[in-house]
Amino acid sequence: MSMLAGLRVLEIADGMTDVGGRMLAELGADVAVVLPETQANRTRRLAWHHGKTIISPDDPDAIRALAAKADVVLDGQREGDRFGLGEAVSDDTIYIRVSPFSTNGPYAGRPATDLTLFALSGLMHVTGDPKRLPLKFPGQQAYALTGIHAATAALLGLQARRRTGKGQKADLSAFQSAVLSNYREALMYEWTGRTGRRHGNLLVRGKSGVRQVWPCKDGYVTWSMIDNPSMMRAVVSVLEEKGAAGELSQIDWDNTLVADTPQETIERWQAILADFFASHSREELGAWSLKTGWGLSVIYSPQDVRGSEHLKARGLFVEVVDEETGVTASVPGPLFHSAVMDAPRRTLSRPVPASGFAGWEG
């Protein structure tokens, strides 16, 4: 039986709760989501709302009635409580109110998007090339991070209810959720007063910066020269086997601190590695890493991920059909697995009126 089988979740979604509701659905909860009709929500429907019952926001009274029956309410309304959920939920309900900013903070009531949340969190300040404009992560990462926190808060609330017999209420800030993922910069500023900066393709430690992303024969890999003697010896041993180690063979890695090595020396060593990586494929480099412990990772394109036999075997992707539009898409499916299983074909149903939703009767 699934972890949350039999639990009823009502979600009011507008970006910030969507991934959280999806996580609870994957854990077995019966999730009904009220999804306002916006273009942004339509683009999220297939990926973030399959496995849920979509409810039209047409009947506030019926939505309040659903809230009264729910074990968990994820309330992502951005402009006040227009459905009156705060008063409708029972004393047994886990009620998670998700807002762009803290309800009592200086930004309370301000609008926000995934882009503005990502920028305010400081994540964009440290992402990208130092000579170019800040970069945002692909997709809607600030919203996704908020959804993860919403699901976590709901699970903690359910655990508290099991122990105390009482429902729980919590306010969750999307801004704080994004900031918490940027833990290093916030802590550095709090303790030192310094702000981080963008370093591009460099991992800066101590006196030097080492490269992180490398072109290879058929794409890219990520690896950094760090103070890990066994790892460095493993890399050099393969280079020696291929006759490409050069001066790297002469280095006593047990007594060498890369972080204290002059940058010009680092660049000379990295030139040897760059030539080696460029002359071998991702598959070759990845195999050597797994066999000898390089700590190297292959960088896959979206097309590589979709075509991966390994991920297919793990059932990562599912085919979802949107009944309303007829669109079929392959999207990431189960977030959790207890065993390897075949990926099912799923249907994203047409929105049903709140007054006509009979899934929680009885």
Image (cartoon, grey):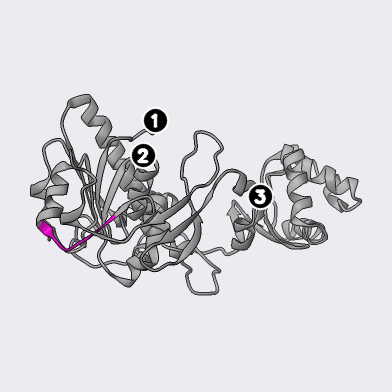
Q: Tags 2 and 1 in contact by the CB under 8 Å rule? A: yes
Q: Which residue is mark 1?
A: 1
Q: Quadrant of the N terminus?
A: top left
x%, y% of residue 150?
30, 47
Whether residue 104 is visible: no
Q: Is residue 81 above or below residue 344?
A: below
Between the C-alphas of marks 3 and 1, the distance is 28 Å
Q: In the visual, does 141 lie left or right of 7?
A: right
x%, y% of residue 93?
17, 39
x%, y% of residue 318?
50, 52
Q: Tags 2 and 3 in contact by the CB under 8 Å rule? A: no
Res 108 quadrant in image? bottom left
Q: Residue 88 or 328: which is nearer the viewer?
A: 328
Whether residue 289 is visible: yes
Between the C-alphas of marks 2 and 1, the distance is 8 Å
Which of disc 1 and disc 3 is earlier in sequence?
A: 1
Res 8 quadrant in image? top left
x%, y% of residue 110?
21, 66
How many numbered badges does the structure rendering display?
A: 3
The mark found on residue 309 in the picture is: 3
Tell me the residue at 51%/64% (across/down). 198
User: Circle 3 — which element?
Assistant: helix
Q: Is residue 230 above or below residue 247?
A: above
Q: Which residue is mark 2?
A: 28
Query: What's the magenta region?
Result: 54-60
Q: Residue 37 or 177: which is nearer the viewer?
A: 37
Q: In the visual, does 225 lie left or right of 358?
A: right
Tell me the residue at 34%/69% (across/down). 40
Q: In the visual, does 299 lie left or right of 154?
A: right
Which of disc 3 and disc 2 is earlier in sequence?
A: 2
View extreme (top): residue:
163
